[in-house]
Amino acid sequence: MKRGVIICVLAVALSLGMAPPESAHAYSLGYGRFSPPTGYWATGTLFPSAWVTPAINASNAWTNVMACDFVWSRNQVLGQLNGNYVTNYNNGADGKPGNTVYSYNGTTIIQLRINLNTYYPFATDGRSTAYDVQNTLTHEFGHGLPLNHSTYTAATMFAYTSKGETLKRSLYSDDIYGIQALY
Ligand SMILES: [Zn+2]
């Protein structure tokens, strides 16, 4: 029985030169799946109440994809029971406003933790001085599916972000093809 932990992150864009070039490669599938195809998640006890709706919107971006069975569902009871949490901890200056860690048993995802690194400023209105909660979480919920990074700069699963970015709130065609390939 293969067990393991995989860590995925959304990194701060240090400069445009950091971005990988566009290429024919696009979405990339991670290891393992939710089976059945529903991911129940709970917000941590310290999660700001003003961030809950942006978090639900972020997960719904994936749930609402057509021709795909996967559902993200915020459920404080089942999310905690399954150990799937969206949290907000200060991880220090690691260059990663968001990160996702999941563990699996065989090919089934058994636990998921998405964290917003509150070392960095976050806001819900897309202001230029902070990372956008919904933007960051839409990317991290994509990791939870699990999708790895896409090479398309327009994709939600592109590896880099910047303050004020809201582009990742909406899925790009490449992201949609990715979740459809998984589920
Ligand atoms: Zn990432």
Image (cartoon, rainbow, N blue to C red):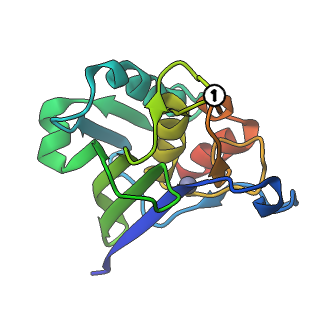
Q: Of helix, strand and loop, which one carries label 1?
A: loop
Q: Which residue is drawn at 52% across and 63% down?
A: 30
Q: Residue at x 46, y 37 (%)?
A: 121
Q: Where is residue 106 in the image (x, y as percent from the top left)?
A: 32, 72
Residue 63 in view: no
The quarter of the image holding the N terminus is bottom left
Q: Indicate the position of residue 79 as horizontal and vertical percent values.
A: 20, 40
Tell me: 62 left or right of 19: left
Q: Residues within 10 Å of mark 1 (few under 14, many from 20)?
A: few
Quadrant position of residue 110: bottom left
**Image height of 78 relative to 126, above or below:** below
Q: Which residue is most to the bottom?
A: 1
Image position of 3 with respect to 173: above or below? below
**Residue drawn where x is 58% and y is 60% of the image:** 29
Residue 100, visible in the rendered structure: yes
Which amino acid does the dot numbered 1 rest on?
Answer: Ser
Q: Say which of 95 and 140 sits in front.
A: 95
Residue at coordinates 47% horizontally, 62% vertically from top-left?
Answer: 94
* Residue pointed to by mark 1: 128
Indicate left or right for 166 with 89 as reference: right
From the viewer's perspective, tell me whether residue 106 is left or right of residue 163: left
Q: In which quadrant of the rendered view does residue 38 lie? A: top left
Q: Quadrant of the rendered structure where residue 19 is?
A: bottom right
Q: Where is residue 150 in the image (x, y as percent from the top left)?
A: 70, 55
